[in-house]
């Protein structure tokens, strides 16, 4: 009898152990696989993954071996920049003779980031002829440039007490809000970074809104289908949320309302505001948060105005091997796609009756490609792309950047090729001393303004003969490919805005305070080809009337002789512009009281 009871106990124990094992297996399968989970649960799981992928897009641009190499070592660099523009592609008027195709920028430098040292010699070539040479130097907190062919000294600015420096210059609206120190360290990348806790918070917050406003009857699944991503077919399962237009829009509104009070997103906007203010890109009266909320409110209003309808809409999440790879939002009016594969490829697409937009980022080892494309309903397609490749070999490295724009008849390409060499020490390192540099912050007001006038006089011919034609050709290309509006003639003077800007550039640095007579004479001689008259009501003010294509040498001689005779006098100089057309109209000399 005892043995029989033992056999019963053993049998029961075996059954209990079996049940426990089965339960453990089922729980494990549920927790670690998609077995036994509902379509609603799996939809929410993989939608959450997709949200997480989007938030972590900054991982595509994390520092690589190339970035670490140049941050941790001294190096010399040689960089070449070339441009190529073709217009009228595929037509009988195809042209490849743009003047920018003949240009090349060459940069040779020495860089030590740890010591805040950066020297670059920049040469501009037209075909094989050097047309401009410029040197840039950063030495700790001092920044400066030198036109090598014109001046022996670097013109340096110390990045501190900048308000005091600006106060010595003629009044300029662009400079009046400059901070005491300009923060030059780029911290924008940190704004895009989210902690894992923040990622989980955002993901759970917005998935929960969808979950609370749907029921299991709205969900379905399709097993073992396929989907095309980056021109490759991938076997995948699809989890589908089906809603009416009104139901989907109602969820949109709840998501947008939540976004307005999302503390993590609001914190990022605040960080962006602070950074843009620090770099003097915006002032503290220009609130990004206000514009953000205004945009959300307008979007909500627009949805509410068109929120009636039972048309079927779907959100489809595709999963392959336990990873979310694609999410599609399909409505009768538009389709939005988000594709994502293992930190190597992400694409955002939007299609409606008017156009198709795509943003694609792909990464393959040391190569990153970013492409933006727009196809309108008339089949006109515009493609913008940036391709970056890097190669690191012990003490050598190379980086190539190719920027390209293409449409049906135009192609613009900019190529940047940088080679670096790691060194222990620089040969012939440029260092600063009293003979080769001048710190603008240390100058008195009169000295500073005289120096600026001298620099203007020295560089005026270079700007006119070298820089202005390049600027005009770039503007012509920008108009041709639709980046800026087609320029129209100003009817009252028959000039384009480019022509006005070119004329006004001659007088950009004329304004100055307490300028000695002999320096005023130098300034007048630099603009004498555009002076047609000298108007005066007293010996305290002279108004030099300007014209684009005429001059009066007799008038110029009279005013320069007077200033030469009165060499002890000083003048404040300013430029007055025509209120109707914006052309520089007068250079005004006001004598400073003795």
Image: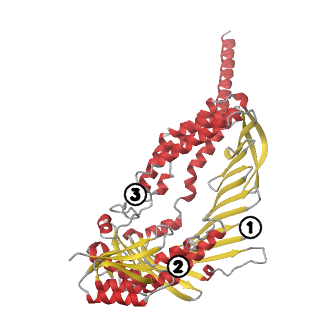
Residues at marks 3 and 1 touching, judged by CB atoms closer than 8 Å: no
Horizontal side of residue 170 vs 532, given as left or right: left
Viewer-proximal residue among 453 and 243: 453
Q: In the depicted view, which residue is nearer to us: 270 or 474?
A: 474
* Helix, strand or loop under label 3: helix
Tally of numbered discs = 3
Residue underneath mark 3: 278
- In the image, 245 versus 570, the foreground residue is 570
Q: Where is 292 relative to 373, above or below? A: above
User: Which residue ends up furthest to the top in the rendered image?
Assistant: 1
- Which of the 4 quarters of the picture holds residue 383? bottom right
Q: Quadrant of the C terminus?
A: bottom left
Q: Tell me if mark 1 has few (under 14), some (14-19) or many (20+) residues whose alpha carbon lies within 10 angstroms of its own.
A: some
Which secondary structure, mark 2? Answer: helix
- The residue at which mark 2 appears reads as 468
Q: Is residue 108 visible in this depiction of the protein? A: yes
* Rendered image coloring scheme: secondary structure
Q: How far apart are marks 3 and 2 (CA)?
A: 32 Å
Q: Mark 1 points at which residue?
A: 408
Residue 452 coordinates in the image, percent (x, y): 35, 78
Q: Which residue is drawn at 73% across and 70% down?
A: 409
**Residue 47's x, y, as percent?**
64, 41
């Amino acid at each position: 009898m005892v043995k029989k009871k033992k056999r019963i106990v053993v049998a029961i124990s075996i059954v209990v152990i079996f049940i426990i094992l089965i339960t453990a297996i089922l729980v494990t399968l549920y927790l670690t696989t998609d077995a036994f989970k509902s379509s609603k649960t799996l939809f929410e799981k993989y939608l959450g993954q997709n949200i997480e992928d989007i938030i972590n897009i900054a991982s595509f641009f994390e520092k690589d071996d190339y970035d670490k190499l140049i941050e941790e070592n001294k190096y010399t660099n040689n960089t070449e920049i070339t441009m190529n523009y073709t217009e009228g592609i595929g037509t009988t008027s195809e042209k490849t003779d743009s003047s920018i195709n003949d240009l090349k920028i060459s940069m040779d430098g020495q860089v030590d980031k740890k010591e805040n040292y950066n020297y670059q010699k920049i040469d501009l070539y037209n075909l094989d002829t050097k047309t401009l040479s410029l040197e840039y130097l950063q030495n700790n907190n001092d920044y400066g440039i030198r036109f090598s062919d014109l001046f022996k000294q670097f013109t340096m600015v110390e990045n501190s007490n900048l308000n005091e420096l600006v106060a010595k210059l003629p009044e300029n609206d662009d400079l009046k809000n400059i901070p005491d120190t300009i923060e030059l360290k780029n911290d924008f990348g940190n704004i895009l970074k989210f902690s894992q806790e923040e990622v989980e918070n955002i993901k759970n917050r917005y998935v929960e809104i969808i979950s609370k406003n749907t029921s299991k009857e709205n969900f379905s699944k399709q097993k073992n289908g396929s989907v095309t991503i980056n021109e490759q077919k991938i076997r995948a399962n699809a989890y589908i949320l089906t809603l009416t237009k009104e139901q989907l829009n109602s969820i949109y509104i709840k998501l947008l309302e939540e976004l307005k009070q999302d503390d993590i997103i609001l914190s990022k906007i605040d960080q962006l505001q602070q950074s843009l203010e620090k770099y003097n890109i915006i002032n503290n009266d220009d609130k990004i948060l206000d514009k953000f909320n205004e945009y959300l409110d307008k979007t909500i209003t627009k949805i509410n105005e068109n929120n009636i309808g039972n048309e079927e809409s779907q959100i489809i999440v595709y999963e392959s091997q336990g990873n979310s790879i694609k999410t599609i939002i399909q409505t009768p009016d538009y389709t939005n796609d988000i594709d994502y594969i293992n930190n190597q490829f992400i694409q955002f697409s939007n299609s409606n009756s008017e156009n198709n937009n795509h943003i694609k980022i792909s990464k393959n080892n040391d190569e990153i490609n970013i492409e933006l494309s727009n196809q309108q309903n008339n089949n006109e397609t515009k493609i913008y792309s940036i391709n970056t490749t890097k190669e690191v070999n012990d003490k050598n490295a190379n980086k190539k950047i190719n920027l390209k724009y293409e449409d049906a008849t135009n192609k613009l390409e900019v190529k940047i090729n940088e080679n670096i060499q790691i060194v222990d020490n620089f040969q012939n390192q440029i260092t600063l001393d009293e003979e080769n540099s001048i710190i603008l912050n240390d100058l008195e007001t009169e000295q500073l303004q005289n120096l600026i006038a001298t620099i203007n006089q020295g560089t005026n011919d270079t700007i006119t003969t070298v820089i202005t034609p390049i600027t005009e050709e770039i503007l012509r290309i920008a108009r041709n490919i639709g980046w800026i509006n087609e320029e129209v003639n100003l009817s009252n003077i028959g000039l384009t805005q480019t022509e006005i800007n070119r004329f006004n550039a001659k007088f950009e640095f004329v304004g100055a305070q307490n300028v000695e007579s002999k320096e005023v004479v130098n300034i007048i001689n630099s603009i004498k080809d555009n002076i047609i008259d000298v108007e005066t009501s007293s010996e305290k003010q002279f108004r030099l009337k300007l014209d684009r294509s005429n001059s009066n040498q007799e008038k110029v001689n009279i005013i320069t002789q007077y200033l030469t005779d009165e060499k002890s006098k000083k003048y404040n100089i300013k430029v007055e512009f025509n209120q109707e057309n914006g052309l520089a109209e007068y250079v005004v000399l006001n004598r400073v009281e003795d």
